Image: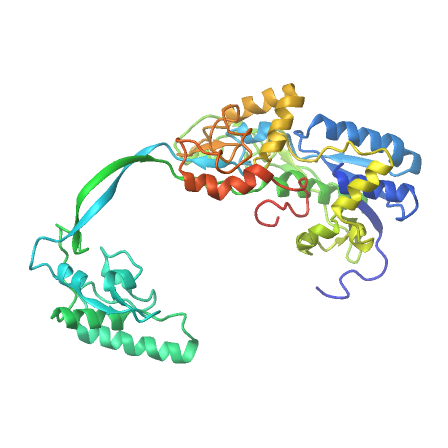
Amino acid sequence: MSSTKYAGEPAARFMSFGAGVQSITQALLIKEGKLEKPDAAIFSDTGWEPQGVYDMLDRVEREIFHPLGIPLYRVNNGIIQDDVLNPNKMRGIPGFTASKPYEVEVVDRWAICPDETCGWRKLRQVKIDSVEDSSEMSLFTVVSADLTDMAGLFDSVVMVPERATLDDLDELTRIAEQREDDDGDDDIIYSDQVATALRRAGLDRLPEKHDACRSMGVIATASHTEIRRDYGMLNRKCTQTYKLQPILEQVRLLLGCVVGEEKLCRYCNGERERVAPWRAKRGETEVAECSVCEGTGVISRVGQPPAGVWAEQWIGFSTDEITRVSNRGDTRYSKSRYPLLELDMSREQCIEYLIARGWGDVVKSACKGCPFKSNAEWRRMRDTDPKAWAETVAFDKAYRNGPGMNHQRFLHASCLPLDEAPIDVKQAREWKASTVPDQVYAARLKLADEGDPDGCSPYACRSGNAA
């Protein structure tokens, strides 16, 4: 970052206020004179925060910001839960996904290919030295590849015909050794092991494809079928869309930028409605409100501040969140500052500080239906806020099938409906269900049990990749 990018003093100081532990700690430090007074605080509202967050926001504004003359701006970029369910808007949250159940055949026992003329059978029986530990291993064990296509054995840059000869393989070995000398071992290939196996099997080239054993040298003699599902997780875009974008837009406005002249929306040609392009690709013809101009038919943008005009943006990261600190959220007109790091305060110290001052009932700022919630948080919502629980369960059911998606979507890591998910289970050995493979639970157990330790920050959500 250029040292002259933020020359001189900032034109203003703005506080990114999430109404969570760290944000309220900063507000109290300002009240006590331990931090200077910012010019404004900005709260980005997704429309889906717990009621406790809105109550705390009102209290801070009433008891701290208003008496100090600090304006609180509440900004938004739509209501996230409505947008996510709207097929005419390309909005999403990082939900867990599961495919529809499908049947697979699992081999229990293998036998050598019964065709004695099969070249793959001969290769299967040949033993060669392993590259790593010099133990005797089958060529099929040494080489990690799809053995139905022997071309997959080789380097992605230098490929050989499927029925490569010994001369082909020797030439590839020479090229591989040259690369190893020049560029390190990133491009080492297994042509020499394949050539060795061919020679020991008495073959002068790779065998022809063999349908009986699928060019594997073995056939299945016993198998069974299993019902499986594929699991995944959607990309996280909500932080950027519903937190950071509206905050930066408000920063530009406070720096004196103006809203540009209204122009005809080129996406709907001013018609206010259109067929969403992602729906048109699927052959759908339903006309709905244009998601770009929000049905107004016109678009206007907030401009950029003059060159050299910039604001100091306060972000409430504590010392235990040092890995979240980054300048990637900085812009030409906004530079991050971390007051709690300057004061060497951890999250636990912030909590103790709030309790000592009668602010110990702070609710974590995160959407009601955030998939990164822990089991404890889901239980707390269910047991203490039945209205929010019912709304979130209803959302989870409506969220299940997304337009154009083959997989189903879920809020809980178990990929079960929220009101059926194992949120009461606290031990790994107890957290198991026949409908989901054990390995999926093992991979997601830590997330489901512990969740995101902090709230949703506009500048770095600890869950998933950095925003």
* Displayed quadrant of residue 366: top right
Q: Is residue 264 above or below residue 327?
A: above
Q: Image check: 391 left or right of 197? A: right
Q: Residue at x 60, y 39 (%)?
A: 450
Residue 461 is situated, as x and y percent measured from the top left of the image, at: 64, 45
Q: Image check: 14 left or right of 149? A: right
Pick whichever, 435 or 270, lies toward us.
435
Coloring basis for residues = rainbow
Q: Image check: 196 left or right of 392? A: left
Q: Residue at x 61, y 32 (%)?
A: 376
Residue 112 is situated, as x and y percent measured from the top left of the image, at: 14, 54
Residue 154 is situated, as x and y percent measured from the top left of the image, at: 29, 66
Q: Is residue 418 above or below residue 335?
A: above
Pick whichever, 140 or 172, lies toward us.
140
Residue 241 is situated, as x and y percent measured from the top left of the image, at: 62, 40
* Displayed quadrant of residue 301: top right
Q: Residue at x 77, y 31 (%)?
A: 361
Q: Is residue 17 visible?
A: no
Q: Is residue 319 above or below residue 260?
A: below
Pick whichever, 324 or 38, lies toward us.
324
Q: Image check: 116 left or right of 86? A: left
